[in-house]
Image (tube, rainbow, N blue to C red):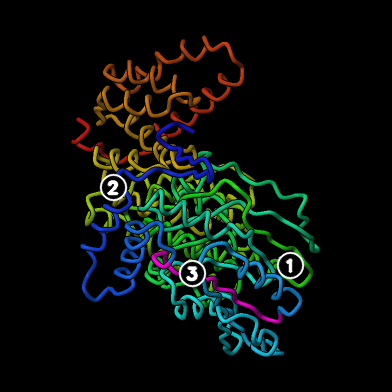
Amino acid sequence: MGDQYEVAADQCEIVGRPCAIPAIEWHRNRLAGCAPDDALRREYHAAWLRWLEHPDEPGARPLVSVVIPAWEAEAFIAESLRSALAQTWSPLEVVVVDDGSTIPLARTLAGSDPRVRVLRQDNGGVASARNLGLRAARGPLVHMLDADDSLHPEAVAAKMEALRRVPDAEVAFSPRKMIGENAFKRAEDYEPRALGAEDCPTRDLLGTVVRHYPFHTSATLLARPLALEVGGLDESLERVEDTRFWFQLGAAGAKAVAVDRPLSVRRLHAGGLTEDVAKMEYYKVVVALMNLRDLLRTPALWPYVAGLRGRVKGRAAILANTDDGRIATLRAEVVAAIAALAARGAASGRSSGPCLAALEGYWRGGAADTREAFEGILAEPVAKAWSDAAAPSRADLEAHLALPAARTRPSLAWLYAWVDRQLVSPAAQVRLGDLRRLTEHWRGHPYRERWDSLARLAPLGHRLALRLERPALGASRRVGRLRMRLRIRSRLRGLLRREPPEASSELD
């Protein structure tokens, strides 16, 4: 991690992108910009200002609500509740949502603590229960907690400190400790990802979510207005609703900060929601399609399409072969979104070409059944969409390179295809300055030398450039790199045989 990326403190190790504006100024400006009728946002920023302006007054601290959804959780709810009430942070309330348990939890928890409220609803699933807790919470900040998990006493205080130091972040999380096992998972098999790495949510929340699960629900503290602004959790999802929720937060531009200490405990046990593997896989396909559809509908999010490939690709068989009505509907919505890419791009001043190139990566490579599955769904609509795609412009380059996600290899897949098309198009006049910018951006990447050589030779014409590049390929001393270059050359030859879109005049 670089010095500009790391935010550290003596007592609380915080990982995240720092805010350029002091906390008091940040919240004061945001409060002044709130709409008069946006009571939740006004309350959120006003609560922070009270604490920041009077840090030594306990009564000036924001109220934090711990929301615990529970269904048939008598075996664990007492421990979970004790851990919430043991928090060193004050003021604090705990909202327990009984999701239609056979034995009402109000009877079990009666008189436990005046800070505890127990709400009851008919069984509607974990997303519905969490949403009820979010709506009923009185605090401007909410800490999530599952009924079978528990919190370290400093969990809330440490995350509040993180949000105080990085005021433009509205999500704070920490690593988790795992205990127990079920039929499919064991705690000892869990390996936490390093905070601050390229795929850390603190760098780019959406860029992380499209590639893997970012953080555990019970390890998360967030601004209540943010959670409600994205509509809460999707109540139509019986599983994987948290992944969809993190995606919505990332798509809304939410910034995350982390505390580098394990401050929550996740318990694996028989009967947990994750134990039904078939249902989990089904809803992972549903959520992946929902996320892909939403990315395709939003031009500003097109650079993330390539990153989602792995989450979709691993479930190609279910995606292609199921007769399930919901998946069929989502497939149709994805196809419709592909057909509308050119129109959306034109309206926003972007080319749909980079997005289409990223989609082509969904079925190229990998196992034969994966290729067949995606070719059957995406190949035809993508091929049709290419005919309407405008050539990429410098505005596309600027937009993609400005995103944190564009610094990771999966998100650069579209860029390889774009430059390939520009180089092999007879009409292309690729400026050396543009190619130099790309090669600088890819410092240390295996493609770097290839772009350098092509950039030097581009003015001579695309066919001559490819011919003159062969000595450079043959001079490679590393067998692995030589093989990669030969594959790249083969790919370029294939592109020469197809009709690429016209090059943008903006690159002339």
The residues tagged by marks 1 and 2 sit, at their Cα atoms, a distance apart of 43 Å
Residue drawn at x 38%, y 69% is 225
Amino acid at the residue labelled 2 = Ser
Q: Is residue 194 left or right of residue 275?
A: left
Mark 3 sits on what residue? 91
Would you call the spot at circle 2 few (<14 residues within 10 Å), some (14-19), or many (20 or more)? many
Residue drawn at x 37%, y 20% is 454
Q: Is residue 451 left or right of residue 9?
A: left
Which of the two discs, 1 and 2, labels the residue nearer the N terminus?
1
Q: Which residues are magenta?
A: 59-72
Mark 2 sits on what residue? 351
- Point out the frontmost of discs 1 and 3: 3
Tell whether label 2 touches label 1 (CB within 8 Å).
Answer: no
Residue drawn at x 76%, y 49% is 189
Q: Quadrant of residue 229?
A: bottom left
Q: Is residue 66 magenta?
A: yes
Amino acid at the residue labelled 1 = Glu
Q: Quadrant of residue 406?
A: top left
Residue 295 point in image, percent of width and height: 40, 57
Q: Quadrant of the C terminus?
A: top left
- Secondary structure under tag 2 reads loop
Q: Residue 275 — which label?
A: 1
- Point out the frontmost of discs 1 and 2: 1
- Secondary structure under tag 3 reads loop
